Amino acid sequence: MDCMQQTIHNICGVFTLQIMLKHFSSPEKGNDTGHCRLKLVNFEANENHISHETQGLSKKHLVVRRGKPFKLTLLFHSPSWNPHTERLFLEVWLDGLSKRIPVQFSDKQPDPQSWSAKIYPGNMHPQSVTIHICSPVLSSVALYQILVHIETIQIKMSYEVGTFVLLCNPWLKDDPVYMPLDVQIQEYIKSDYGLVYMGTYLNISRRPWSFGQYEPGVLEACLKLLQVSPQHLSDKHKDYILRADPVYLSRVICAMVNCNDDLGILEGKWQGSYKSGVMPTEWSGSADILHRWVSSNCSPVRYGQCWVFASVLCTVMRVLGIPSRVVTVFNAAHDSDGSLKIEEFYSSTGEKLNLSKDSIWLVSLALNPQRNFHVWVECWMRRPDLGAGFDGWQVVDPTPQEKSAGIFCCGPCPVVAIQQRCLAAPYDTSFIYASVDADVTRLIVRDGLVVGRTLDTELVGQLIYTKSLGSDTPENLTQTYKSKTRGQPAGTVRGTARTGGMSPSLKVTLAIDGVPSVGDSIVMCVTVTNQSSSPRVLMEHLNAQLKEYNSSPEKSFWKTHKEVHIKPGEVLTFYHTISPSEYESVLAGDHIVNVAVVIKDMRTHERVLTTQEFSISSPKITIEIEGGDIIQMKKEHTAQVSFISMFTKTLNGAVLTLEGSGLLQGIHKTRLVLLQPGEKIENKVAIMATSPGTKLLIATFSHSNSPSIVSRSFHKVFVMTA
């Protein structure tokens, strides 16, 4: 056997291929004179990519979807291939796993249950032949090698002609990720733009995210993610076989998005300094994160938090062909002991204490057991391991919280299993159920003893949002997780105290008037009802603390107390105001205010606690594109960004920045030494788009009075080809 290697080019000019020519001769025959030889292979990339809905995913590889035929055209030297004397075979390889496919003449459609290679009438020409190759619908997601074999009785010639990537096929009914409506596929597979909802359930903000699946190198990064997973490194053949199953794929990818057990993409950080990496709030897309991970030889990218983990996971799943969407749970719980109950501790004056065992992650990160929001991903797939009743959306959560089967991943868990409380259904249903439906017990502690207790059965999972189909409006998913929707009317934040197991003689409610913005006073309304037949002397303690979306509360920045006299059956209402000057000095970009009131009966020592958490809306940054938000590629346009200070104090070192991948080179900054209350800072910047699609301009405002970003705004720009 002799062997030679030559480099050739695809006819359509898209790929450079390496062909390995191998001759297998019988002892009587020492050469292949008179037999056809392969000259070129045209991967028909443009036509295949259009047919398979994979345009833009890669410039290096042919990318096709399983269970659907794709075309290869073989061109021969003279003499051409003679089907009467020479047999033609294709062979697909996955690192030692191979399938030999005879090329057959046929006018029948291929069977998507097995590999096939067919030549249809009209596909034979004097020196070329077009072959339609179809993979099984349950083929593994991977990068395949393809070989061509030409055989006679006397000789065999083999050519290694290149590679192709095989993805899941949500367009195909037999694929486990099949999605029936094209509008759903457009949103959950093809769209590279999304929204992440954040904040509190009555003051919801949204953050645009560029999933970036069409950015150069993103598909290759997703394939590399599979190749460096522990499953692949320990048993390649087993991993390749199991990759046909989206349930398996989702667990592998979920674990690989965080770096806690493996060579994963992101390192999480929830407190302290972010100087050794990127602050999680500064990310706006997945492509930059994936590029950094690949270029660093799979070292973890610093830093991520829940919405970053979830958005990167969504990108990888969409690239591989599994419909996915980012979902936000407001008032999400973290149940570390599997009790389906959450405990919170407060001092006798209403200060929240970091004492709960539910507040410690297994990765030793201090968390508040009831987070204001948490972000995960829903992936669409059938669940043959559980039965048809559990098909559809599955929760997959890559944020490292608790271990599942020994690794930091969570899901896939059927959403319907959560709604129906089928807590034994795999994977991690009990933990996810607690995230959206756990009860919260609040304990008042004094001198190490519990002196009061209230129970809240409605707070957790107050609202669950995702981006709507084809729209920037939110879709409310709460009812898909719960048997009934439990919520409050917009505009008022209200909490009511209840004492578990007994009827209290005092009823206390706490409400926040409206949704405060920076520069507004925070107005709180406490209502106390004396449900006993005796007059009472009460002590009211009201306390305000700052916290980040998922961390323990900080030290109180405002508190008050006073004595109250109340008659039998009387209802008293008290208003309290926190002025802007009292909170501006401590306010930071993503902080949330926790307010608690404790009412104590001075004679009986009965205590009643109620709490609320809310965010203060950041001041707005205005971004405008002259001529509108639809611009032409490679044509200069002007963007104007401006900010008016709503703060009551003069700000030092004010900085207004503008950046935008695909629109701007680098970061453009405007600085003012002093920014007076009501004064404007602005900047005009020339932008030019280098590629079509949806792009984001990101503006941030910061000042030296506070190290945290005070405000961030996004602006969506649609780029059209010239």
Image (tube, rainbow, N blue to C red):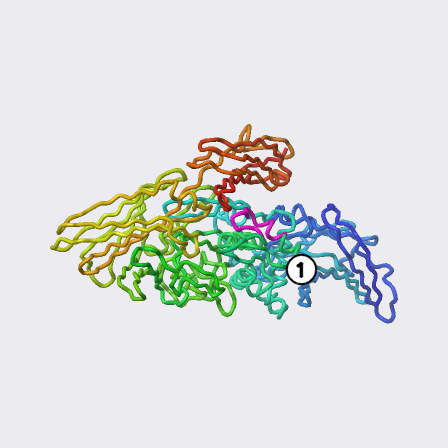
Residue at coordinates 31% horizontally, 52% vertically from top-left?
A: 596
User: Is 190 on the left-hand or right-hand side of 539?
Assistant: right
Looking at the picture, tell me which residue is in the foreground, 68 or 616.
616
Residue at coordinates 12% horizontally, 55% vertically from top-left?
A: 534
Secondary-structure class at tag 1: strand
User: Is 305 on the left-hand or right-hand side of 89?
Assistant: left
Q: Position of residue 176 (x, y in %)?
A: 51, 59
Looking at the picture, tell me which residue is in the foreground, 695 or 159.
695
Q: Position of residue 294 (x, y in %)?
A: 65, 55
Badge 1 is on which residue?
144
What secondary structure is the magenta-colored segment mainly? helix
83 above or below 201? below
Query: Does residue 172 appear anywhere in the picture?
Result: no
Q: Residue furthest left?
A: 533
Looking at the picture, tell me which residue is in the foreground, 22 or 285.
285
- Which quadrant, please, contains the N terminus? bottom right
Looking at the picture, tell me which residue is in the foreground, 210 or 31.
210
Q: Amino acid at mark 1?
A: Tyr
Q: Is residue 673 magenta?
A: no
Find the magenta span and give its range: 277-291
Q: Residues within 10 Å of mark 1 (few under 14, many from 20)?
A: some
Q: Residue furthest top?
A: 627
Q: Is residue 287 magenta?
A: yes
Q: Position of residue 270 (x, y in %)?
A: 49, 56
329 above or below 342? above
Q: Residue furthest bottom?
A: 27
Query: Does residue 242 appear anywhere in the picture?
Result: yes
